[in-house]
Amino acid sequence: MEFEIGVIVLLSIAFFIAGFIDSIAGGGGLITLPSLLFAGIPPQLALGTNKLASSFGTGTAVLNFLINKKMLWRVLLAGIGFSLVGSFAGSKTILLLDPDLVGKIIIFLLPLGIVATLIPRKGKTNSNTLTKIDYYLKIPLICLIVGFYDGFFGPGTGSFLTIGFFFFTNMKLIQATANAKVFNFMSNIGSLVAFLIGGKVLFMISIPLALANITGNYLGSRLAIKKGESVIQIFLIIALVLLLISLIWKYYF
């Protein structure tokens, strides 16, 4: 596919905004994926291209958490393999479906991702004592299920992982968020491999979109302390409602 410079610029702006929002409130994929679809990219190609570009942004967040030593390495070892397997299986599943059906499925799943993004994450503090059940059952199961969702669709994955770790294990919120970013990154990689094998990635536009997403993540994370989530979420809701209406019009009328 060929794209005009204006389209690439607009998509890059969307990926920049998404990276900025994602670093503060989560849910950046709820902007990037619909933007690609609205630009006329077929659903499966949009999913694959989004995975490649957003992986760089997620990787930037992972690097920040690594530098600040917020990771629980035993947790990562317990779930990384399940994230990879789940996301690969989810992507292989979506590649088997008809593109028009995939577009309609994405419209159906968008509200689910929105809900996950807007669920409050504060107000609860946990001890940091994880049990064997956490390591050998809960963490692998959360990673497998959410990994499959990430490969099949994607937006809201980081929020689902954070919520899962925070409410179903004894992780503190900051550690749940940090480890969720790593698993989100790994599930992106597993999903990306499936899309690459299926030839469903547009490399020409992935590079500028990845750079825009990285820049947004970097600047957003620097401003996250000064700016609260509430204002960002208001703009996120407005953007998502407009995009959702556009996609419903595109695939149902």
Image (cartoon, rainbow, N blue to C red):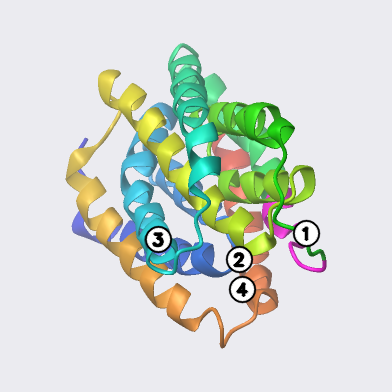
Q: Position of residue 110 (x, y in %)?
A: 64, 42
Tell me the residue that label 1 is attached to.
Answer: 126
- The residue range painted magenta reads 115-123
Marker disc for residue 155? none
Which residue position holds label 2?
A: 25
In what element is the residue under mark 3? helix
Q: Are marks 4 and 2 in contact (CB under 8 Å)?
A: yes
Residue 50 in magenta? no
Q: Is residue 243 left or right of residue 56?
A: right
Q: Is residue 10 above or below residue 75?
A: below
Q: Residue at x 65, y 51 (%)?
A: 162
Where residue 192 sits in the image (x, y, percent)?
Answer: 34, 32
Q: Is residue 40 visible?
A: no
Residue type indicated by callout 2: Ala
> Does residue 119 belong to the magenta stretch?
yes
Q: CA distance from mark 4 to mark 3?
A: 25 Å
Q: To which residue does mark 3 refer? A: 66
Label pair 2/3, CB-CB below 8 angstroms: no
Camera-side residue: 112 or 227?
227
Q: Upstream in the sequence, badge 2 or badge 3?
A: 2
Q: Answer above or below: position of 97 versus 58.
A: above
- Residues marked 4 and 1 touching at CB (< 8 Å): no
Q: Amino acid at mark 4?
A: Ile
Q: Which residue is mark 4?
A: 232
Tag 2 secondary structure:
loop
